[in-house]
Image (cartoon, grey):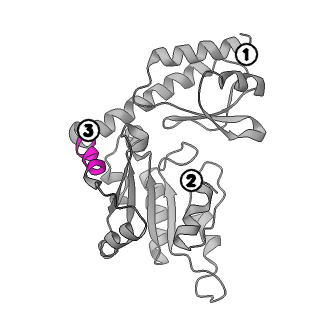
Amino acid sequence: MDECGSPVKNTGCQIRPIATKDGKLTPELILPHLYSFGNQHHSQPGVVYMSQCTELGTIYTPEELKAVCHLAHQYNMHVLMDGARLSNACAALNLSLRETTVDCGVDILSFGGTKNGLMMGECVVIFNSPLKNEACFIRKQSNQLASKMRYLSCQFTAYLTNDLWLKNARKANEMTNKLYEALCSIPCVHFTQKPESNQLFLTMPRPVIDKLLQSYFFYFWNEYENEIRLITSFDTTEEDIEEFVKVLKHHAGI
């Protein structure tokens, strides 16, 4: 799993990954992992962790979120939403933050700023009142209380003013759509996921990738299959896209 196993080390909890085709959890996928409730020989599930947008750039609809949250609450589990790219999901769905979180039954949200223009920082929002009581202690014990926390927190004042968070996300999504349209005309490029946010997942010949990496920075998503991830942001320009496509075509011999 990602993050070098730090969630397990820092919390002492067991994490059960659930395989999906599009990165989205469903009640049908979760249910088989709940067989151990009440069995003292197995760890007891307590939290459903979901990302919006997902790790594959896909987006949950409110109906899909409500279905997962309903199942979790039926089994007395909490729902934690990783909202590192929640702004991009809201922009794509044309919905408010409330409509995609608390209205769907989410208990705790990590509202992302780092991946949408902030210098650094995520905002933890607790919708489930009983969970709020211990939050400040957990923050301190987990070394998340910075000495000058106000310098991290004040970014969100500007971020939430005049919908800056939403404007940034819309721009990033728009640039991804433009990049997608431009890459569709290149024969050696094959997309592995339908673009829904500001992320593209695609494959191309390894020699082309290696040459691109000399000029651009991006990650392999699945190096064995030559799958890479391309991401646009609030400050990506059309000129950036045109230049990238031009360089790619050159390396692909087009």
Q: Going by the image, does 116 lie left or right of 33?
A: left
- Secondary structure type for disc 1: loop
Give the mark, 2 or 3, whose residue is nearer the N terminus: 2
Q: Name the amino acid, label 1.
A: Ala
In this view, 165 is above or below 121: above
The answer to the question of whether label 2 and label 1 lie on touching residues, with beta carbons closer than 8 A, is no
Q: For the magenta stretch, what is the residue range?
A: 151-159
User: For the point 43% across and 67% down, which residue is it?
Assistant: 142
- The disc placed on residue 252 is 1
Tell me the quadrant of the picture where the N terminus can be found.
Answer: bottom right
In this view, 16 is above or below 112: below
Q: Residues within 10 Å of mark 2 (few under 14, many from 20)?
A: many
Q: Going by the image, does 136 lie left or right of 85?
A: left
Give the mark, 3 or 1, whose residue is nearer the N terminus: 3
Identify the residue position indicated by label 2 in the image: 24
x and y, in percent, of residue 128 in the image: 33, 70
Q: Residue 205 or 192: which is nearer the viewer?
A: 205
Q: Residue 125 or 79: which is nearer the viewer?
A: 125
Identify the residue position indicated by label 3 in the image: 163
Q: Name the amino acid, label 3.
A: Asp
x and y, in percent, of residue 17 in the image: 63, 62
Q: Return the residue found at the far front.
A: 147
x and y, in percent, of residue 227 in the image: 70, 36
User: For the point 35% across and 33% down, which residue is it?
Assistant: 168
